[in-house]
Image (tube, coloured by chain):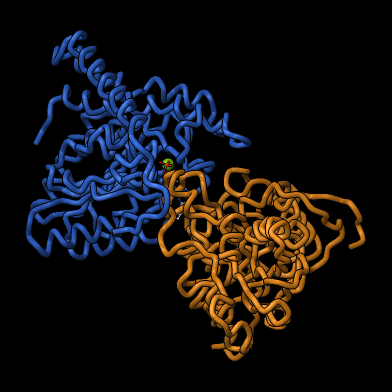
Chain colours: A orange, B blue
Amino acid sequence: MTAKGRKLTYSLAINEALHQSMERDDSVLLLGQGVKSPWYVGNTAQGLLKRFGKLRVIDTPVSENAMTGAAVGASIVGMRAVVVHPRVDFMLYAFDPIVNEAANWSYMNGSRTPVPVVFWGVVNRGGEQAAQHSQSLHATFSHVPGLKVVMPATPFDAKGLMTAAIRDDGPVVFIDDRWLYDVEGVVPAEPYVVPIGRGIVRREGKDVSLVASSYMVAESMKAAAILEREGVDAEVVDLRTVKPLDVALILASVGKTGRAVIVDGGWKTCGLAAEVAALIAENGLCGGKNLIRRVTLPDTPAPASRSLEKGYYLDARKIVEAVMR
Amino acid sequence: MRVSPKDLYRAMVRIRVCEESFVEPILAREILCPVHLYTGQEAVAAGVCAALSKEDYIFGNHRSHGHYLAKGGGMRELVAEVYCRETGCSRGWGGSMHLVDPSVGMMGSAPIVAGTVSLALGAALASKIRGDGRVAVSFFGDGASGEGVLCESLNFAALERLPLLFVCENNLYSTHLPIDEIRVSRKIFELGIPFGVTSRRVDGNDALAVHEAARKAVSMCRKGKGPVFLECLTYRMRGHVGPDDNIQGTHTDIRPPAEVEKWRRKDPIRRIERHILRNRVASREELAEIRAEAEAEVREAHDFARRSPFPGEGITEPT
Ligand SMILES: Cc1ncc(C[n+]2csc(CCOP(=O)(O)OP(=O)(O)O)c2C)c(N)n1
Ligand SMILES: [Mg+2]
């Protein structure tokens, strides 16, 4: 990392990736709800409309299905469209263009046309917003062949993965998290990519591997610090990309520690944690009882009341408990 | 069923007093869940619901306090839900955006834009299959006119001649976007015409006009001549979410102050008040009494909510 010290928030790192990608390549466009206002997407889209104009930065009606299909179509004919959904929940109206069309397009059309589109969905939960304004659906997207799914945990990765997603020739689902928007970190000023499909070890340890992504990486780091005081040396693996998984990295870490606690901000059943657990087990690691644990949301919709939210969402304490249990 | 202007007044005042009572606890962060106040749009809920019987169904959206109250939902249970307490109509699991009371035909509300339109369609379909004469109403905003499901629902409702009343509350804004930035024509009701749906626009700040139009629409639905699309032109006097968009972080109310002022002068409650007094339907004192009753009811509901426990720690499985 060259720019030593230059710090940026997670949200402004995304903003910089968009500015630089649109600057570098005229075929990049951004469409979705709220791109002209801080209303929905915070400051992630700031300055884009002014700089690149209404032709390439389009604030849209509430029409997720058609807008997402339009992003796919524009990308099929040579643009690189980024379509933003200010909440992942709204993206469900767009499931058809994402799954049936974009994910399958290249394959079912004999690889004749690439589909370089980015589906950007923001996880925006908490604050008693309840079931339709809280969901984390990365596992659902990861289930679909033809989609790549990235989930940055740091400002550096937010910029690098957005840039990589835009440059990728296939459909990429980019999922960020409002709870990370104000986190600051070192972000080089020049354009760069974080390779899709590569995870990273955020903290080395020898007793247990905490495998996490996005917001859960920070909580896992906190948990590791607490565990250290308890005499447990935890390694933290940040997946960065949840489809395709960095299998080699996961297996190397778990092979070393012999124990995996998989931390995921999604639901349990058929979730990301289940997939990672299966990978580990299939490879003959962590064979014994209690050597693989999942720390996930319970299999229930998100509640409104603050009293229930506390029990619902994950934090470092719950991760520590799972490790110590 | 034609209700008296006095009853419409009562229904509207209950909603207004309730809505305004949330401002302080929201600002004090005693209420946390997102609250989309209905202030300014009361004539729509009151006028439409007064044309329905208890057995008829309604489905709401993110801005549904008014729909719930007008249909007969309890004040205490509404206020407690907004405080996310166990005694709320959704047990504190849903908050302001999820109001329900099946016993009075308020079948639920949800904030996915246009998400409940097709649910109302299904309720109307059930009503037709069972031949029970019930009408279903779908309340949605101008923003929902952008969702394809609205067109799909209009088409199927017309095809099946379903007893469904589409009520579009056109308040000219969809969050930060004025209507001219989301569609070419301001006349949303025209959407229904190519599908063969009887469609018209009414002044959504005139409770009597809304009520009259809703009565006709409901009567058509009951005779198998539905569906009907009713666009009610109105305005919200508070923020998109919370009391005022200008005071929430970087959000700014992009509505011109002169426009807000113009609509303030068209206040639906003052309007029906004038009608009532001019036609001597009730005296000033009687109206003051109605307001005082509403204020007492709302105060009591806040006390009830604040006394109520939060839903139990831990996760309750949905039943
Ligand atoms: C599918 C979906 N997309 C986007 C949103 C975000 N959103 C919440 S309210 C709203 C606008 C609603 O405008 P309108 O339908 O006119 O209702 P109003 O708020 O004016 O009552 C939007 C876009 C959402 N809730 N659901
Ligand atoms: Mg509106």
Where in the figure is residue A230, as x and y percent of width and height? 69, 59
Picture residue at 19% right of the left edge, 40% below the top: B214
Q: Ligand 2 is found in which quarter of the picture?
A: top left
Visible residue check, residue A56: no
In the rendered image, which quarter is residue B311 located in?
top left
In the rendered image, which quarter is residue A221 located in?
bottom right
Asked if residue A58 lies left or right of residue A47, the reply is left
Question: Outermost residue toward the front?
Answer: A231
Query: In the rendered view of the protein, which quadrant contains the C terminus of chain B?
Result: bottom left
- Vertical arrangement, residue B34 with respect to residue A210, above or below: above
Where in the figure is residue B17, as x and y percent of width and height? 32, 23
Where in the figure is residue A271, as x and y percent of width and height? 51, 72
Question: Outermost residue toward the bottom?
Answer: A110
- Vertical arrangement, residue A159 with respect to residue B218, above or below: below
- Vertical arrangement, residue A94 with respect to residue B12, above or below: below
Where in the figure is residue B33, as x and y percent of width and height? 45, 40
- Vertical arrangement, residue A90 with respect to residue A75, above or below: above
Picture residue at 10% right of the left edge, 56% below the top: B224
Give the tally of numbered discs. Answer: 0
Asked if residue B55 lies left or right of residue B151, the reply is left
Question: In front: A260, or B49?
Answer: A260
Query: In the rendered view of the protein, which quadrant contains the N terminus of chain B?
Result: top left
Asked if residue A285 lies left or right of residue A228, the reply is left
Question: In front: A81, or B258?
Answer: A81
Visible residue check, residue B121: yes
Picture residue at 86% right of the left edge, 56% below the top: A189
